Image (cartoon, rainbow, N blue to C red):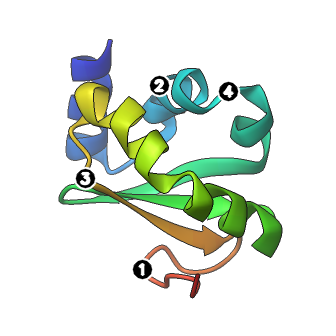
Amino acid sequence: MQTAAIEVVKTSGSTAALVPVWAEAVGPQIARNCEPVAWYGDALVISCASAQWVQALASQEKTLIARLSPKLGIRSLRLQLRGAPAGGETPR
């Protein structure tokens, strides 16, 4: 599943295939409020519903990367507010 999800993202650019992997790694509450929107190299861009969610994920970033890295091979998260362009990172 993870390998297939990674291939879909790399070939299509759509992160929809990552949603189940993300939800399993972060739990339902975070998954309802934050979602993967882009993948650049080894960084996963996460769009969050509010600045509070950006801060919450920033405080858990190392733990989340440790959970996601074996499945996706990511090394960092880029956190942003929902509606911001995928390349635009929200200051933490």
Lower position in the chain sequence, tag 1 or tag 3: 3
Query: Residue under circle 1?
Result: 87
Q: Position of residue 11 (x, y in %)?
A: 21, 42
Q: Name the mark nearer the viewer: 1 or 3.
A: 3
Name the quadrant containing residue 19. Answer: top right
Question: What secondary structure is found at the residue carrying circle 1?
Answer: loop
**Identity of the residue drawn at 31% across and 41% down:** 9
Question: What secondary structure is found at the residue carrying circle 3?
Answer: loop
**Which quarter shows the N terminus?**
top left
Lower position in the chain sequence, tag 4 or tag 2: 2
Lower position in the chain sequence, tag 4 or tag 1: 4
Label 2 – label 1 distance at C-alpha? 22 Å
Q: Amino acid at mark 1?
A: Gly
Q: Position of residue 26 (x, y in %)?
A: 60, 33
Which one is in front, 4 or 61?
A: 61
Examine the rendering and report whether any part of residue 82 can be seen: yes
Q: Position of residue 63 (x, y in %)?
A: 46, 42
- Mark 3 closeness class: few <14, some 14–19, many ≥20 residues within 10 Å: some
Q: In the image, which disc is placed on residue 27?
A: 4
**Identity of the residue drawn at 75% across and 27% down:** 28
Q: In the image, which disc is placed on residue 75?
A: 3
Which one is in front, 14 or 1?
A: 1
Q: Name the mark nearer the viewer: 4 or 2.
A: 4
Q: Amino acid at mark 4?
A: Gly
Label 4 – label 3 distance at C-alpha? 19 Å
Examine the rendering and report whether any part of residue 50 can be seen: no
- Mark 2 closeness class: few <14, some 14–19, many ≥20 residues within 10 Å: some
Label 4 – label 2 distance at C-alpha? 10 Å
Q: In the image, which disc is placed on residue 21?
A: 2
Whether label 4 touches label 1, CB < 8 Å: no
